Image: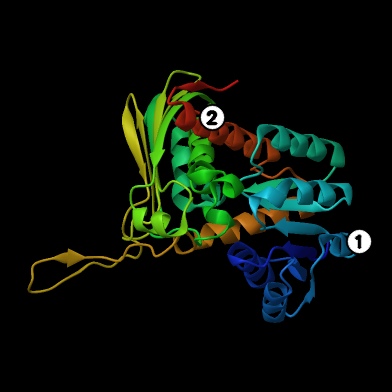
């Protein structure tokens, strides 16, 4: 098969990232169109990639030369665009989270199963060297039986305020917006499903912003969870913590421990007469997982060419949605929530 022709749906931050990767860093792929209802954004990315731009996804789905689409739009549009693309027999790479409700996610899963098309949800941590190495070590039984996993996800800033990414109704709050990656990587590493969650959340580091702009997402989330085989887990998700982007995981087994990630972004530490050692933290999630994003995109293209199912499926997207919904329910009720 020749190059896979890909249309980028959504020309914001993530659409730009994926567009550049597919266009310049992924082999056997070619970006052929950019779609965004904001014509100015579409034209900006289209100009950078030297491709045609559109404001309506239907116009692109009607093009016979488009093999696949990459959906990088607000979460509330994911279901609609996924269903349209699958009906048009286009392969789909969809940004996380899959949807905001379990019912909508189940509908997408059903459409994928009936379409004959490939579908990949964009959980890029699975393509990070550290996460991949940890998964292999766990499969080898290096630490024995995993009994506890802790996932830390912290971002130096906030989604734009005001904006859909900071509106809890539009983005699903911090549980969906930030911690979907934690939920997916935890169940993947543990090779087990989450049975029960208890969560607390609040606006702690962004009180002045919330006071100025009104309602916004929580910036601090702590989740305790239990897995089906009895292991425990915890998630701490924080926004607007200033010091840098921070993604770390610790898995404790009955015979050892695995640590993924660290605070140091590049392999340099410096000091001076003040007797203080310093090192750079990762500026953003894009910097921390830059290589993983390229590998994620390459995997999608390779799966289309080779006719194999992507490693991260629509079912994985559904599983993360179930956890995120349960976490939000626990925050609202103040009680532990069992997952079906």
Q: Where residue 126 appears, x then y in whole percent?
A: 54, 46
Circle 2 SS class = helix
Earlier residue among tags 2 and 1: 1
Q: Quadrant of residue 6?
A: bottom right
Q: Quadrant of the N terminus?
A: bottom right
Query: Position of 120 compared to 133: left or right?
Result: right
| Numbered label attached to residue 109 | none
Marks 2 and 1 in Cβ contact (< 8 Å): no
Any part of residue 60 in sight: yes
Q: Quadrant of the C terminus?
A: top right
Query: Position of 26 compared to 232: left or right?
Result: right
Residue topped by disc 1: 62
* Discs 2/1, front: 2
Q: Is residue 241 above or below residue 278?
A: above
Query: Position of 126 compared to 247: left or right?
Result: right
Q: Nearer the viewer, residue 97 or 70?
A: 97
Any part of residue 155 in sight: no
Residue at 45 percent across and 32 percent down: it is: 331
> How would you rate the neighbour count of disc 2 (Cα within 10 Å): few for under 14, some for 14-19, many for 20 or more?
many
Q: Quadrant of residue 44?
A: bottom right
Q: Where residue 92 appears, x then y in whole percent?
A: 75, 51
Residue topped by disc 2: 326
Q: Is residue 305 above or below residue 340?
A: below
Q: Where residue 328 appears, x then y in whole percent?
A: 51, 34
């Amino acid at each position: 098969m020749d190059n896979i022709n890909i249309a980028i749906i959504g020309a914001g931050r993530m659409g730009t990232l994926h567009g550049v990767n597919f266009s310049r860093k992924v082999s056997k792929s070619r970006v052929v169109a950019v779609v965004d209802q904001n014509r100015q954004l579409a034209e900006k990315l289209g100009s950078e990639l030297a491709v045609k731009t559109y404001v309506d996804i239907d116009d692109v789905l009607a093009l016979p030369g488009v093999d696949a689409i990459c959906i990088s739009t607000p979460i509330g549009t994911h279901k609609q665009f996924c269903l349209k693309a699958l009906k048009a027999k286009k392969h789909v790479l969809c940004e996380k989270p899959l949807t905001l409700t379990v019912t909508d996610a189940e509908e997408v899963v059903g459409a994928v199963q009936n379409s004959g098309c490939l579908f990949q949800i964009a959980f890029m941590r699975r393509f990070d060297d550290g996460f991949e190495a940890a998964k292999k070590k766990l499969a080898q039984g290096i630490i024995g039986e995993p009994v506890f996993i802790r996932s830390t996800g912290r971002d130096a800033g906030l989604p734009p305020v005001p904006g859909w990414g900071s509106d809890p109704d539009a983005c699903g709050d911090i549980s969906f917006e930030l911690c979907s990656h934690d939920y997916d990587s935890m169940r993947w590493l543990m090779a087990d499903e989450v049975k029960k969650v208890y969560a607390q959340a609040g606006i702690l580091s962004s009180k002045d912003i919330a006071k100025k702009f009104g309602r916004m997402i929580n910036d601090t989330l702590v989740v305790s969870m239990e897995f089906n085989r009895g292991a425990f887990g915890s998630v701490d998700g924080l926004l607007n913590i200033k010091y840098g982007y921070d993604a770390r995981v610790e898995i404790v087994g009955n015979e050892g421990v695995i640590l993924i990630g660290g605070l140091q972004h590049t392999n340099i530490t410096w000091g001076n007469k003040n007797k203080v050692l310093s090192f750079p933290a990762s500026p953003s999630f894009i910097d921390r997982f830059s290589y993983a994003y390229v590998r994620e995109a390459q995997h999608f293209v390779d799966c289309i060419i080779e006719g194999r199912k992507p490693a991260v499926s629509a079912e994985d997207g559904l599983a993360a949605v179930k956890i995120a919904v349960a976490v939000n329910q626990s925050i609202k009720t103040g009680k532990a929530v069992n997952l079906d």
